[in-house]
Image: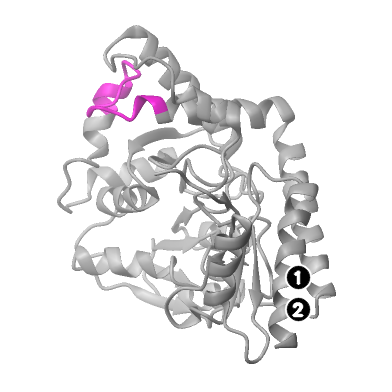
Amino acid sequence: MKVNYTLFTPGPVDVPEDVLQETAQHILYHRDASFSEMLKATQQALNTILGSSGQTYIFTSSGTGALEAACSNVLSSRDRPVVATCGKFGQRWLELCKAYRIEPVTLSVEYGRSIPPEALEQTLKQQDKPTIVLTTLAETSTGALNDIKAFGEIVHAHEGYLVVDGIAGIGADACPQDTWYIDILIGASQKALMAPAGISFLSMSERASALMQTSDLPKYYFNLAIYDKFLVKHQTPWTPAVNIIYALKKGLDTILNTGLSEHLIHHEKIAHHVRTRVMAMGLSLLPEHPSNALTVIRMPSGVESTGIIQEIRDRYGILFANGQAELRGTILRIGHMGNYTIPKLDKALDILEKVLRQQRET
């Protein structure tokens, strides 16, 4: 089936042609020295982009797999982690805790808001030390960006452990792991790292790795103790998605060749441009503190986003994203992480403005 639209969704994203071409390379045997060299280089590139001096684990899975790996390897059955959530994807931490029969302490805010650091501090004051905090950098369902730097300082001061879902934000929003006291930082291939979906990863600090020794939760595919035995040889325990790793490595190299700070500045510029245009259309944004990865627009009164998204996809070959759960139909999400430029975004925004104007005139 031929795809007849260009992605402007917040993941998966439109992938550069040279990155896509990497997936057509001959498949390496995953026990061959050439694969070990590629995996090692990919881990090193990830550590540079993440600002991490820790161990990085690469999984053949969606980002949720890496979230589960974090939970199952560092949590124990008697733990009461703090789950700080501001949207649907942040709630995935709650779902994982439920799956492992762990009762978390929940800190949540309404959709569109970011979690106030002072609220996290007040919550931690009421918990035993050390506490594990599970949270999100950029909430894809609302576009909200959390102040992970402040979170890190607070959790560190309380002798806790900070675990961050950075899947949507890494590469679009600054999030240096070591500097911000992040113990586990999680990401995936299909967002601002500009590769196809299929690879997730987590980077773990040395102090967090000690928690693996006391974790009593069941695990097998994501058992990091097994991964450690193979990482000595720069291999994975299970058959990996070799050609997606090729593509991820190409995306990472593109970022590093540009320079990480320049890559982040680019995302800041295009995010500002998109929001300036959106507000010039008379529209408002949902999040109070938006991520550079996406722009989330509130629909005008009487206008429903589902039909608009379908019309733009079918007539113009441009795909935006709808809201999720109770936000479905009330918002429109525009992804602009990775392979996007201002001219490319302007073409999509011109179409959006045209269709919205026609809706208002009927």
Q: Residue at x 72, y 79 (%)?
A: 358
Tell which of 219 and 54 is nearer to you. 219
Helix, strand or loop at mark 2: helix
> Callout 2 environment at 10 Å: few (<14), some (14 to 19), or many (20+)?
few
Q: Quadrant of residue 241?
A: top left
Q: Residue furthest bottom?
A: 302
Q: Residues within 10 Å of mark 1 (few under 14, many from 20)?
A: some
Main SS class of the magenta portion in the image? loop
Residue drawn at 28 percent across, 63 percent down: 96
Q: Nearer the viewer, residue 81 or 295?
A: 295
Q: Amino acid at mark 1?
A: Glu
Q: Is residue 143 visible?
A: no
In contact (CB < 8 Å): disc 2 and disc 1? yes
- Asked if residue 46 lies left or right of residue 342, the reply is left
Q: How far apart are labels 2 and 1 at the CA level?
A: 6 Å
The picture places residue 82, in percent across and down from the top left corner, at: 40, 69
| Count of marks, rendered view | 2
When the figure is inspected, residue 73 is found, relative to residue 346, above or below; the finding is above
Residue 251 as seen in the image, left or right of residue 219: right
* Element class at badge 1: helix
Q: Which mark is residue 357?
A: 2
Residue pointed to by mark 1: 353
- Whether 109 is among the magenta residues is no
Give the answer, above or below, for where 19 lies relative to 107. above
- Seen in the image, is 89 located left or right of residue 74? right
Which segment is the magenta one?
Answer: 228-243
Task: Name the residue: 47% across, 40% down.
Answer: 189
* Residue 302 position by quadrant: bottom right
Check disc 2 and give the amino acid type. Arg
Position of the N terminus by quadrant: top left
